[in-house]
Image: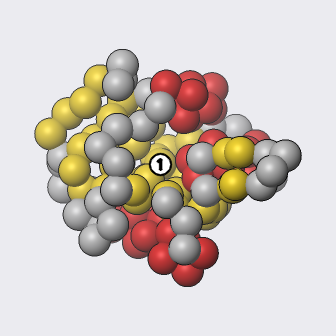
Amino acid sequence: MSENTAPAAEPGPEDKKIITLARSARARNGVPEGAAVRDDTGRTYVAGTVALASLQLSALRTAVAMAVASGAGSLEAAAVVSAGDSLPDEDLAAVRDLAGPDTRIFLAGPDGSVRAELTA
């Protein structure tokens, strides 16, 4: 994992919301990861892992793509709920492409507990 990792900071109310949404997407769809991103206008995009024969996308890259397709100018925050302990560089690059100056990325476990705050 090449991103900067900080100890898990206490997320604010809006950040807790996207963590909950990411957790719900993971559970509802029975996928390995759930993700949610919040854009600079406060809109939220929620996604799960995409695993088709012709298309493989992580939950985070799917959520970023949804934000871009909806016209988001930048991201304020992102959350991923996963059993994994890191995010691939490609996921962080997708956030970085749309990141604002203070974009926060939370990595949470399946129970919703934040394990790390990452920097894009």
Front residue (pair 29, 60): 29
- Looking at this view, name the residue that lies furthest to the left: 7
Q: Is residue 71 above or below residue 24?
A: above
84 left or right of 70?
A: left
Q: Where is residue 77 in the image (x, y as percent from the top left)?
A: 46, 47
The residue that disc 1 covers is 78
Front residue (pair 85, 3): 85
Q: Position of residue 81 (x, y in %)?
A: 40, 59
115 left or right of 31?
A: left
Q: Where is residue 68 in the image (x, y as percent from the top left)?
A: 76, 43
Q: Quadrant of residue 44?
A: bottom right
Is residue 67 visible to the viewer in this orientation of the structure?
no
Residue at 22% from the left image edge and 50% from the top image edge? 115
100 left or right of 19?
A: right
Mark 1 residue crowding within 10 angstroms, few (<14) / some (14–19) / many (20+):
many
Q: In this view, does 20 lie above or below 72?
A: below
Is residue 53 visible to the viewer in this orientation of the structure?
yes
- The quadrant the N terminus occupies is top left
Residue at 43% from the left image edge and 53% from the top image edge? 79
Q: Helix, strand, or loop for circle 1?
A: strand
Q: Quadrant of residue 90?
A: top right
Residue at 60% from the left image edge and 47% from the top image edge? 58
Residue type at tag 1: Ala
Q: Position of residue 71 (x, y in %)?
A: 80, 46
- Looking at this view, name the residue that lies furthest to the top: 2
Q: In which quarter of the image is residue 96?
A: top right
- The quadrant the C terminus occupies is top left
